[in-house]
Amino acid sequence: MSYLDHIRNCNRYALKDFRPFYVEGVQVGHIKSAFAEKLRCWPAIFRVSPTAVHLVSNLQSFEERTQEVRVVLEALVEEGIIPRWHGEEYAVTASSRERALFVIDRGSAPYLGVRAFGQHLNGFVNQGGQLKMWIGRRSRDKWSAPGKLDNLVAGGVPHGVPLQENLAKECWEEAAIPVEMASQAVPVGYISYRFETQEGFKPDVMYCYDLELPPDFVPQCQDGEVEEFYLWPVEEVAALVQETDSFKRNCNLVIIDFLIRRGFITPEHPDYLEIVAGLRVPL
Amino acid sequence: MSYLDHIRNCNRYALKDFRPFYVEGVQVGHIKSAFAEKLRCWPAIFRVSPTAVHLVSNLQSFEERTQEVRVVLEALVEEGIIPRWHGEEYAVTASSRERALFVIDRGSAPYLGVRAFGQHLNGFVNQGGQLKMWIGRRSRDKWSAPGKLDNLVAGGVPHGVPLQENLAKECWEEAAIPVEMASQAVPVGYISYRFETQEGFKPDVMYCYDLELPPDFVPQCQDGEVEEFYLWPVEEVAALVQETDSFKRNCNLVIIDFLIRRGFITPEHPDYLEIVAGLRVPL
C-alpha cells in the first residue's frame, strides 16, 4: 500500500463497455451498454444508439426532464434492475450543482454515471502543537464499506440544499457537532476522482473542510451510522492510510489531501507530483 | 478581471507550431518549429523531423546528454538565437526533478519547452484573527514583470539543489527571512500551468509554502529585486487579485490557491469547480 495506490484505487475505470450520455448535446454521464439497452424501452425519453445515449431533445425544461426520467427510473426500480429508491434528489449536470439540467434519485446516479457531490470534514484537535484527528469507524451494518474507518463527517449533497446547511446537518447527525461549531468549518478545496462500479460510473466531487475542535469535545453519533470514534495523532493516521486498507476507499484521499495541505507529506516524497495531481483529476 | 481570468492567462497556449521533444522515447518538452529547424545543424545530437524532435539515442548517460546539448545551446546563445546564458542548471525530466535525464541552462528551458520548477511562499501575519499578507513590489529594472506585485518569496529551483535549501536561500535574498524562520515554512502542495511564450513553452510546477511570520518581522530585500513591501489584509489582497492585473501573472495563482485553502474563496463561488481544477492542470 502507498498513498498513490489509494489514488489509483479511486480512479479505476475502463469505460470500454460504456456509452456517453448527453442532454442538450452536452455530456453529463456515462452509461453501461447493458443498462443503455434497457432504456430502449422508452424511445420517447431516451434515444439509444450503439455509441451514445441522448435524452430526447423535446424535453426542454428542468421539470419536464425530471418528471419523464423519473417515470423510467421508477419502473427500473420496480423491475429490480436498480436495487433501491433512496428518496434523495441528485443533480444531473455537466458542471456544478447550481447548473443542474434535471434531478434523479440518488440510487440511480451511478447507472447514468452522472457527477456526484459530497462533503467530507477533517475534524482535528491541536493538543499543545500535536495535531490529532477524530476518526470514525463505520457501523458493521452499513450497506457500503461496513466496519471501515471514515472521516469524522461525510455525506452526499442532495440537489437544492445549500452546502453549509447540508454540512451542518451531517455534522449533527454523524458526530453531534452543534450548528455553531459546524459553522467554523473551513472549506479548503475539493478532491475529484472517477470510479467504475458494478452499477456504472461515479465521477465524484468531494468538497473538503477542516474543523478545529475544542480539546474537550467528544463526537457522538446520532444516527447509528458510526460504531466508535478515535482521536489519533496525525502521524498515526498517516501511517494507517499509507500502510493499510483500513479506511473507506475515498476517505483515504481526504486524509492525503489534509496531509499535503499541512505539510505532513512534503515535496521530497518521491511520488509528490503524482499524489497532488491525483487528488484533482479532470472529471 | 476574475480569478478564472488569471488562471486562463497562465494557461494560454496553442502548440500548433510546436513539435514534441523526446528523450529515450519519452516526451520531455515542446519545441517551436522555427527553433526545431535550427537544431537540424546538429544531426549527431538532435533528430529533427517535421512532426517531432528526438535527442539521438546513442546519448545514453546523464553526463553525455548534458555535455552534448550544452554545446548546441552555447552555440545558439553565441549566435544570439537564445538571448542569454543564466549560469543556472535546470532539470530536463518527464516527471520530477529527481528523475532528470540531463540538465540545460535555465535560459534555454523555454526553447526546449521543458518543465520548470519554482517555489512560491505566502508570508502572512495573524493580527488578532485578522490575516495579513506580506506582498512585494518587483523592482522597476527587473527583466520580467517590472513593477508588478509579487509573493513575499519566489524563485526557480536549479537542478540538484534540495528544495529546503533553495527556499532558505531565496527567503534570505528576497526578504531577509533568517534560516531558522524559513525552516518553519509549511509546504502545502503545488500549482501547475502551461504557458506559451515568445521563446517557446513553459509547463510550470510552483511548489507553494505558507509561512506565518512574527507580528514584528519586517522583510528587507537583500538583492535589489524588490522595491517595496506591503502588509495588507487578506481581503484586500483578494480584491486586488480579483479585480486587477497588479500581480505578476503566475503569482495570482499562488494567492488564489491560498484563498481556496483558507476558505476565503468558498464552494459557493460560481466558478469554484473550475478555479480549483485550474490550479492543477495536467502537465
Image (spheres, coloured by chain):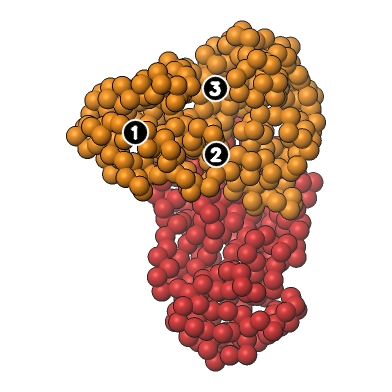
Chain colours: A orange, B red
Left or right: residue B216 compared with residue B254: right
Which chain does the residue under circle 1 lie in? A
Q: Chain of mark 3?
A: A
Mark toward the start of the polypeptide (2 vs 1): 1
Marks 3 and 1 belong to one chain: yes
On residue A273, the disc is none
Q: Name the one closer to the observer, B258 or A257.
A: A257
Please tell me whether mark 2 or mark 3 is closer to you in this view: 2
Residue A4 at x, y percent in the picture: 68, 45
Residue found at x 43% / y 50%: B6
Q: Is residue B7 above or below residue A61?
A: below
Question: Which residue corresponds to mark 3?
Answer: A155
Expressed as whole percent of the image width and height from the top left, the position of residue B117 reads 62, 60
Residue topped by disc 2: A195
Please tell me how crowded label 1 is: few (under 14), some (14-19), or many (20+) other residues with Cα within 10 Å: some
N-terminal of the two: label 2 or label 3?
A: 3
Asked if badges 2 and 1 are on one and the same chain, I answer yes
Q: Nearer the viewer, residue B159 or A169?
A: A169
Look at mark 1 in the image and give the residue it sits on. A39
Q: Residues within 10 Å of mark 2 (few under 14, many from 20)?
A: many
- Rendered location of residue B163, percent (x, y): 73, 56
